[in-house]
Image (cartoon, rainbow, N blue to C red):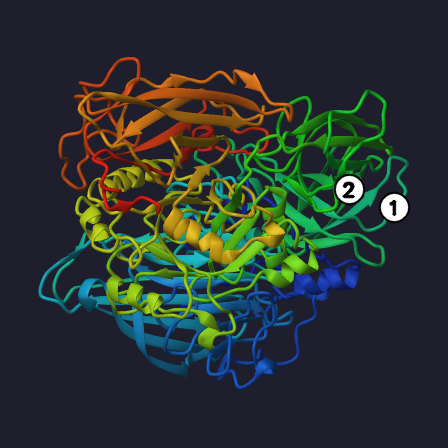
Amino acid sequence: MIRSPERPPLPSAVRGRRPRPGGLAALALACATCAPPAQNGSVVVSSGAAERLGMLCRWGHGDAEQGELCPRADGAARPARVRRIAGPADALSGPLAAGRPGDHVLENDEIAVVVEQLGPGAGLAESGGHVIDAADARARRDELGQIVARLGAPARQAVYSELATGAGEDGAAWIEVRGRGGAGGALSVTTRYTLGPRDRALVIATSIQNDGGAPIEGLDLGDVVHWGAAAPIAPASAPGSRGEREAPYVAGVGTGVAYALAAADGAPLRARSGAGFSDATFARPAALPPGGRAAYQRVLAVAPRGDPLAVATELFFLGGGAPGGVAIELVDARGAPLPPLAGKVTLTPIAEQGAAPAGGAAPAGGAAPAVGAIDLWLRATAGGGPLGAEAPPGLYEVGFEGSGRRALGGARVRIRAGEVAPARLALSGAGRLALSVRERVGPAPAAGSALPGRPTPAKISLFDATTGRAAAPPLFTLSGDLEIPLPPGQHRVVASRGPEFSIAEATVDIAEGGEARIELAIARVVDTSGYVACDLRQHTARSADAGASAAARVASSAVEGVECAVASEHHLVADLAPAVAELKLGGRLRTIPGDELTSARGGAGLGSVSVFPLDPAAPAGGALRWRDQTAGALLGEVRALPGERVIQVSLASGGGSPLHALEAPRGAPDLGADLAALVGEGAGIDALEVWTGREIAARDRALEELWGLLRASRPVTPTATSDTHGLLGAEPGYPRTYVGVADDDPGRLDVADLVAGLRRRRDVVITNGPFVTMRLGEARQGGVASVRRGARREERSLSIRVERAPWVDARELHVLVGGVANGAPIALEGARATPAGALVDEIAIPVVVGGGGGRPPMRLGSRDGGGLGASRSGQSAHGAIAVAEDTFVVAIVRGRRPLEPVLAGAPDEILPFAMTAPLWIDADGDGRSLGRAAAP
């Protein structure tokens, strides 16, 4: 049998340092709530004894007695090596493989890692010298985005200008990069990447020195990992969970490879993860005095499979453990072997008295704590035989989910180091649901009649009817027809297509081995005529910090009712039109190529700037680079391009990397003044993204910035985007921007008219559910209502219409005048139902011109009031609006019931919210209001 190695098999560069007690050795099963990849990826697990034992033998490495199970390999392992990519054959493959000629490959016979050559960096990296690809050396398929060393908070990068390679002791090879970082470049930075001859983990060691004359504080030292096509996971965290927490490691699970990043000494790190990134902090020196030094060291493990069990096993081995193996035979209720299945095998460690579960450290004086399940993802493969994989030793409960089956009871297996333990698991018969979803185009059909309507894209959400918990991630259908494997039991099925549509649901009983059929009809109930539903900032795997493919992004947009989507990759222009055409969605979705720029070392601290439309066929792929230039210079460069385009500024990062807003102060007191200098009719910033994804607190701050700009006579269009980087918890179109256009058919959308709508007409509605519009006389939101006052008080009426699908809640209407609440909120009741099935409230508010009250002058950036403004004395209790000077009016709608079951997440993040663009009021009749000119 395989014996435990005589020394901890840490990567050779750190082998002289023993792991901390409870450190790397305890990492393996900390993956307590590791979840499946968000992209529903799967992994082929080798079948048959020879393949299984071959997988186990890779741990032998020849440095311990292996016995008859694994013959000792002939000769010593080949040294690790460094070479430069000369052509495609030298690079790695995969959906995100970024290596190009001139980049450096650091590899051994186990893994291969690509470090980018010096010069401009890929993705959000300011320079080369960072890890951009990593893969198993045999499969050579990369799914990683990039890893960028982070120095400080807010995030700052090292800009590398020197690179050297070499070989070390014991056959190791290394790449070393040197450069500068920190505010003003006061830090000298050196990072060395080292790989031993047999290691499956890259050692990354970074050292810094303060070459300046003053102490440097706030030096959070860590890495920002853009997981690319891998789904981020972390122990005791749900997928996509936010907030900072302590963890033993961060990891990403792809379809055929997985990655884990941990401190080399096994110490816990501070981690924050999002839809496509993890921000890991390894050290936090209080301050670095002049001449002071600091360093941190971590390991990047590359697992040969794409599942959490592979991550657990790699980390267990790095901590000095010797893994064993498990051979799982799946049988039916009669004991007959089943063909290969798709799904996941779960191994749940069982705590035993006085022993840690599956290799973890036991607490003093008691039983080991329970540890959650780790998953082994499977897909159907040719051939039979047991399923095999390596795993940390311990006692486990074995379960199974997938292929419409469930485990009939459980099976226990004890895994020992160097041994293959058999496990036999009986499964139920396979259940199946045949689902048809149609868009109803007329009245609801009589009971028992045929399903009317036409095929429609839809999102299908599945819940356990007994517990209410989600049974699986949402599924997409573009044709309206879907066959879903479901285990026996009662299930709630919900079909949706965004907030303009009704939802349809049914509860279905799935019998063991049986099939059920249901038909659901949804309908477009909300009248948004004259507007197109746009998501003005989306990302695919072309952005290093996002994991969705172009096809997945297009499909996810279609099923959420998005009609216009801007592809805003980081520093490159992507065209999603081929994916739209391939999926036959040209009549439902229009995509626009754009570019998202992030302020770099000399940037003005504005966060992210999106520019669209752009031409992917232009030089450098149509992309712009924002480096060492002011924001004003960048805007001038954009305006100098032929044609007309939208410039949109976001002050929030949304779902993406913290490197989005490099050195960008968010919510700083003087930020309004900085923005004001760049906002103006025609030449400056056109749109201010006031709502990004589920960032509710950031939305309130951005609204205050908006009110300050408008008061300062700086007209700008408010927008809302999902900034989606993933799929689950980052759905396209939540929130979205409705833009007034001449023809709202997505298949005929005139992009130039859309641009004019955002830049000049400013007739928009931002929402995640309700649809609210506003009109004063002939002017609606975005326009100017000239209401010249006379010698007497003149009364007009502001008309506000709130329309929503029945599943969308809308309880309060807030009317803001000059950014200040005009009296108490107005209750909404859905007083009238339209023939299509929407609920409508229509409110008329008197507008008195020439009366008292009004708004005293306010300083730009004033924090008087909150995101909804503060009620001011002098305004009538019944809500009449008294206008004494030029001002603007905004309508905001709020709901109290979360947008379930269509969205899931923290309730406060998915509460309904909608807002109109400002409607400017010209009180003195000069044809202008606060810098906004009335339409001719």
Q: CA distance from mark 1 to mark 2?
A: 31 Å
State the image coordinates of residue 320 (x, y, percent, origin top left): 50, 57
Is disc 1 placed on a helix, strand or loop? loop
**Where does residue 596 sit, x and y in percent of width and height?**
41, 60
Instruction: Locate the N terminus and report the quarter of the image it occupies.
Output: bottom right
Position of 923 with respect to 171 (left or right) is left
Amino acid under disc 1? Pro
Q: How far from the left and from the top, in percent, is residue 138? A: 64, 72
Would residue 403 appear left or right of 900 to someone viewing this image?
right
| Residue at position x 54%, y 38% in the image | 355
The residue under the point 55% across, 32% down is: 353
Report whether residue 573 is seen.
yes
Q: Are marks 1 and 2 in contact (CB under 8 Å)?
A: no
Q: Residue 136 or 659: which is nearer the viewer?
A: 659
Q: Which residue matches tag 2?
A: 481
Callout 2 secondary element: strand
Q: Residue at x 30, y 69 (%)?
A: 627
Mark count: 2
Q: Residue furthest top?
A: 877
Relative to 746, residue 912 above or below: above
Q: Residues within 10 Å of mark 2 (few under 14, many from 20)?
A: some
Q: Quadrant of residue 859?
A: top left
Residue lying farthest front? 791
Which callout, 1 or 2, points to the residue nearer the camera? Answer: 2
- For this orientation, the residue located farthest to the left is 213
Q: Which mark is residue 337?
A: 1
In the image: residue 252, left or right of residue 706? right
Looking at the image, residue 167 sits to the left or right of residue 455; the answer is left
Residue type for callout 2: Asp
Residue 458 vs 494, above or below: the answer is below
Instruction: Say which residue appears at 49% left-offset and 21% top-offset.
Output: 841
